[in-house]
Amino acid sequence: MHRNIFLLLITFSLTSSAIGQEHTLVLTLEETIEQARRQSPDAQNARHSFRSAYWNYKYYCANYLPALKLTSNPYLDCAINKVTQSDGNVKFIEQNLLSTDLTLSLTQNVPWTGGTFFIETTAQRLDLFSSDTYSWQTSPVNIGYSQSLFGYNSLKWDRRIEPIRYREAKKTYVETLELVAANATEKFFNLAKAQSNYEIANANYANADTLYIYAQGRYNIGTISENEMLQLELNKLTEETNCMNARIEVENCMQELRSYLGIQEDLLMKVRVDNRVPDLHIDLDAALMLANENSPEIQNMLRRKVESESAVSRAKANAGLKADIYLRFGLTQTADKLKDSYRNPLDQQYVSLGITLPILDWGRGRGQVRVARSNRDLVYTQVEQDKTDFDLNVRKLVKQFNLQAQRVNIAARTDYTAQRRAEVARKLYLLGKSSVLDLNASIAEKDTARRNYVTTLYNYWSLYYTLRSLTLYDFENNKPLSEDLDKIVDNQYYFDNKSITSAKR
C-alpha cells in the first residue's frame, strides 16, 4: 500500500512536470552568468557604485577648471537706525532704502599653490525712497588672488589621490562582474548537484524496489535469508526518503538561483551542465604580472599609501604657522547715472594678510603630527603584508587551476567506471553470485563518483572566474577584460534590457 502511494506521487510529479514543460527554463552556465551580470543584486550594486565614483571624479576634475558665477544680494532697509554723524554725534535717523547689486566673477584654482585667482565686474544701485533719489557704484574690473601660505594644499593632494581612486573604481567594476560570475557559478552547480542527487535517488529507488520484489520471491523459495530480504527492504525505504529529501533540495536551490538572477516569475528551472572544459594552462609569472597591473587591490594599496602621506601633510599644516593673504586690484566709480559710473574710474587696492602662530598648545599640534606619522607607518606595513598575501593567493590559485582540468578528466573516468561497476554488481546479485553488501558498496561508490564529478566541474569554473577577477584577463580568448563604462554612466546596461526568460520563450 505504501509503495503504491509513493509511486502515485512520483507519477503525479512527472505528469505535472510534463504539463509545465513549456514553462521550464533550461540554462547553461554561460546563460546563467550572462543573466547574473545583467540582473543580479551584486551587478546592480556594482553599477550604482561605479556611477557614484564617476560623478565624484567629475566633481574633482571640475575643481581645476574655470568657474563663471553670477551673484546678487539685494536688500531692503526700512527702519530707524543709529547713525554716527561727521562731528561724532549719534542720531537716530529714519532710513528707507533699497540696495541692488550684481556681480559676474570668473575664478580659477591654482593646484600648485592651492590658491584661487579671480576676475570680476560689479554694479550696485542704491535707491533712497525718502528723498526719491538713486545712485550707482560700479567696479568695471577687479583682479584678485587668495592664498594660504603654509596651509594644507587639498588641490595638490587630490590631484594625486583622485585619479587613483577612479582607476580603482573602474577596475573594481570589472572585478565585481567576474565575482558575480563566480557566485552565479556556485548557485548554478548547487542546482546541478541537487538535480544529480534527485536523479540518483530516483534511479536508486527504482532499483531498490525491483531488488526488493525479487528478494521476496527468492525468500519465499528459501534461497536467501530473512536478514538479506530485510536489508533490501531497508534499502528501498532509505532510497524513498532520499527521493523526498532530494526533491526539497532541488526546490531550494532553484529558488536561490531564481532570486540571484532577478527572475520574479515562479517558473521551473533546470541547468544543463557542459562536460567539456577548456584545457588551459596559465603561466604563473604572467598571471602575477597581470594581477599586479590590473587588480583593483593594487590600486587600493597605492591609494592608501598616498592618503596616509596626505594626512601627515595636513597634520603638519595644522600644527605650524598659518598665514592667509588676499590681494585685489581694480577700478571703481560712483555716479547718479549708470553710464557715468563707468567714466574716469578710480583705482582701488585691497591687501589683507592674516597670521596665526601657535605659541602654547601643550603639544597638541606636535602630537597630531606624530599620530599621523604612526598611522602612515602602519598603513605602509599593512600594505606590504597585503601585497605579500595577494601574490601568495594568486600563486596558490594558479597552481590549483592548472591541475583542475586533469582532475575533471579523472573524475569523469571514475564516474563512468563506478556506473559500470554498479551495473555489473546488480547483475551479479540477481544471478546470486554476489552479496547484498557488495551491491550496496557499488551503489555508494557510484553515487559518490557522480557527486565528485559535478563538484570537480564546479571547482574548475570557480577557480577560473576567481582568477579572472584577480587578473582582469580572459585566459581562454587571450585578451584583457573590459566593459563599456559609458553605457553604465548613461544608465544603459552592457546587455540588452530583454530578460533571458523572455528570450527563451
Image: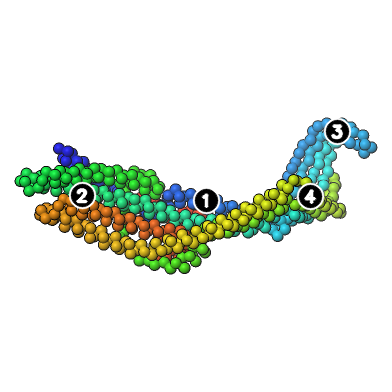
Estimate the x, y position of residue 202 in percent, counting from the top left.
22, 48
Q: State which mark lies toward you, 1 or 3.
A: 1
Look at the numbered disc 4 and give the secondary structure of its residue: loop
In this rendering, does residue 339 appear at all?
no
Rendered view: 170 above or below 221: below
Estimate the x, y position of residue 363 in percent, counting from the top left.
73, 48
The disc, 1 or 2, on the residue closer to the chain's N-terminal end is: 1
Q: Which residue occupies 72% across, 53% down?
A: 317
Pointer 1 residue: 49
The disc, 3 or 4, on the residue closer to the chain's N-terminal end is: 3
Q: State which mark lies toward you, 1 or 4.
A: 4
Q: Nearer the viewer, residue 130 or 320?
A: 320
CA gap, disc 1 to disc 4? 43 Å
CA gap, disc 1 to disc 3? 57 Å
Mark 2 neighbour density, 10 Å: few (under 14) some (14–19) many (20 or more)? many
Pointer 4 residue: 357
Instruction: Report the amino acid beneath label 3.
Output: Lys
Q: Which mark is residue 82?
A: 3
Look at the numbered disc 2 and give the secondary structure of its residue: helix
Q: Which mark is residue 204?
A: 2
Q: Toward which corner of the image does residue 445 lie, by quadrant?
A: bottom left
Instruction: Report the amino acid beneath label 1.
Output: Ser
